[in-house]
Image (spheres, rainbow, N blue to C red):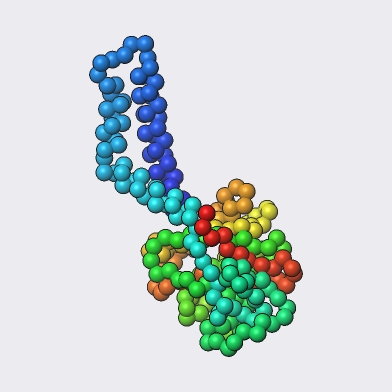
Amino acid sequence: MDCVLLYLFSRFMMIEEQLRDAVTSNFSNKISLSPPVNTKRLQTSLKTLDFRSEMTRLIDALHILLNPQELTFNVCTAHPNLNVSTDLCTVRFTSNKQPYMDHPERFTSAPQVLCSQSFSSGQHVWVVEVGPNCMWAMGVCYKSIPRRGDHSRLGHNTVSWRLQWKNGKLTACSSSSNVVIPEKKPHPTKLEMALDYEGGTLTFHSIKGSREHIYTFKAVFKEPVFPAFSIHSSNPDSWITFHNGM
């Protein structure tokens, strides 16, 4: 998505330069009765199908970025040590196990939770903030992810992709293959996750302060994917919350 935006922005800047030249020439002391050549060229560019198509794609991309997907946590999947808020937008680690009812989709080994929403097509963006001292993992997975045992951990199977901040290290993992990401200072506490289902990418950006690319997974998604989260620390700052809408 970033490459597309950069390409469209460069095309827009080229047209903006032509427009600036045209405006300047219109205010010159010698006004020509016929439109300047660059103005004709600009008018022609504005009428082309390619230009309209590019601007439509740009507007669609900006709409996705400016309007994050509204997500909620699925209590039926939450590990007993995770407390989901009443509005379903925040999850906290708690040492007191929650009195959740037994459910076949509940995680019983790893402290994880899925969202109620899933995606099987299109482009989607969601934004989360984590506690300043929270150790976390987040990504996407198929519904078929195991619910107990070591292979239920995000990234430690063939049906999930996750970014993790733990013990001062930032790592990306899928199919149990770990990639250590160069240290980020400060470590990310507000993140944007962008899914392009058909394009086969899941991209993470840190968006607190300046916007910084962290990592992009490339995959061929074959089933609906669910946003997934995990908390690995037990201090009071161990929480994750959604920033829904604007």
Residue 7: image x %, image y %?
41, 44
x 57%, y 49%: residue: 211
- Considering every residue shown, the one lying at the far front of the view is 86
Residue 9: image x %, image y %?
42, 41
- Give the vertical position of 16 relative to 132 (above or below): above
x 65%, y 55%: residue: 184
Quadrant position of residue 215:
bottom right
Quadrant position of residue 183:
bottom right
x 25%, y 16%: residue: 33
- Give the vertical position of 159 relative to 66 (above or below): below
Is any part of residue 6 visible from this angle? yes
- Give the vertical position of 230 relative to 59 (above or below): below
Question: Relative to residue 25, is residue 75 drawn left or right?
Answer: right
Is any part of residue 229 visible from this angle? no
x 62%, y 80%: residue: 79
Residue 20: image x %, image y %?
40, 26
- Considering every residue shown, the one lying at the far top of the view is 29
Count all numbered tags in the image, as a single digit. 0
